[in-house]
Amino acid sequence: MASLQTSSPVFSSPSRRSSSNRTINAAIHVRKLPRVRFADLKPTTKLVLEGLQLKEQVLKHENTDLYGNNHSAAAAAAPTASTTQLYALLEAVADRVEMHANIGEQRNNWNALLLSSINMITLSASLMAGVNAAAGTSVLALNISSAILFSAATGMLLIMNKIQPSQLAEEQRNATRLFRQLQSEIETVFALRDPTEKDVKETMEKVLALDKAYPLPLLGAMLEKFPKKFEPAVWWPRNVVQSQNPRKPKSQMGNNVNGWSEELESEMREIIQVVKNKDIEDYERLGSLALKTNKILAVSGPVLTGIAAVGSAFVGHGSATAAVAAVAAGSLASAVNAFQHGVQVGMVFEMYRNCAGFFNRLEDSIEATLGEQDWEKRENGVVFAMKVAMQLGRSLEQLRELASKSALYRSNGEPIDEFGCKLF
């Protein structure tokens, strides 16, 4: 409660000042607020402070790693010598892919241009010889022109049959594909793990083996187009590694170590027998047939154009035999040339060489893997079996069925009636 005294204004008269003095009492009631009890904030504050201190320590630690240990981080990020070397090989392989692709396209153009040019020359010369014979008298210009054209066709055919442009183009196509495959293998190594010196060495050997199998130049390094015997192509380093470690007893190896088992080993050996006895043998037979056919055609074409050149020189001198020989031999030469280089018999021969080499490489790969006696040092058995199955165009189940079928036929002393590969 508050007591307030008020008086009249100062300008009022003194007589009235005493009577007018009075006390005015006013009461002001203030509402009481409820009492608020605050909880003890000391534990919460302690936790917050501890969290801030911990965060500060973490930031200090990160800053120390960022600025204080920058030399060690840079050292850890620096590539190893093996990584640098394998990157250099990757660049070389990519360059070879481009080179072989360009040269393969160029040599394929050679085949098309030479085929059309030689056939046009041969047919033109045959037409001249026929016109000269139909004239009844010898026309010197036609005799000389047809003889020159037939001679030119003979020389061009000799060169074309020697180098076999269709086979050269197929070689470069195979080289391009294999170098791209090697490029993918190198990129897979970088994606999965850090390269080692062994990776660098193996990659170098593969590159050199491919360079030897599919050379770029023609003079001095060109592959023999008419070998005495059909031989599969070899584009990988043939160094089968045999383990020097004695094989562990079966009781110590267990039933499944690194994906390998006795059953899987037996299946791989059966696959080798099927590939060797069926696929490789079949492609060697087909390759030998293509080689013989190509040899006959390569000789027949120049011989026929040579006969036509000699016959065309005597057309119109009263000898009908010369005219018939010139026209008939020229026409046959065009047909032989069209069949040999149009069908690309040389390319077919090279395709059979590559297919037989593919199966030889598969056989070497399986034998090299099985030659390692320590199962833990081999490639994972499941992964290896999957690779073999994919190369043969089969699933894992079909691969096991093929191995079981081969074992059954072999136990009965009969050859299996199925090829290992379903791709080609």
Image (tube, rainbow, N blue to C red):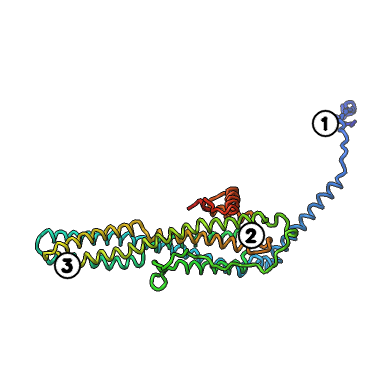
Mark before the other along the chain sequence, 2 or 1: 1
Looking at this view, is 293 or 51 the one in front? 293
Q: CA distance from mark 2 to mark 1?
A: 116 Å
Is the N terminus in the top left, top right, bottom left or bottom right quadrant?
top right
- Name which residue lies at 35% across and 67% down: 162
- Disc 3 marks a residue whose amino acid type is Ala
* Circle 2 crowding by C-alpha within 10 Å: few under 14, some 14–19, many from 20: some
Question: Judging from the image, what secondary structure is the residue with disc 1 in?
Answer: loop
Query: Would you say 323 lies left or right of 223 here?
Result: left
Residue at the image position 44 percent from the left and 68 percent from the top: 215
Which of pointers 3 and 2 indicates the residue nearer the eye?
Answer: 3
For marks 3 and 2, give the CA distance: 70 Å
Label 2 SS: loop
Q: Which mark is residue 198?
A: none
- Locate residue 276 relative to residue 326 in the image: left or right: right
Give the residue type that dot 1 points to: Pro
- Label 3: element kind: loop
Q: Amino acid at mark 2?
A: Glu
Q: Residue beneath label 3, please?
A: 313
Image position of 177 (left or right of 262): left
Position of residue 219 measured from the top left corner of the image (x, y, whole percent): 38, 72
Residue at the disc numbered 1: 9
Q: Are marks 3 and 2 in contact (CB under 8 Å)?
A: no
| Residue ID at (56%, 57%) | 273
Q: Quadrant of residue 271?
A: bottom right
- In the rendered image, which residue does mark 2 sit on? 379
Number of the front mark, 2 or 1: 2
Pointer 1 local density, CA inside 10 Å: few below 14, some 14–19, many at least 20: few
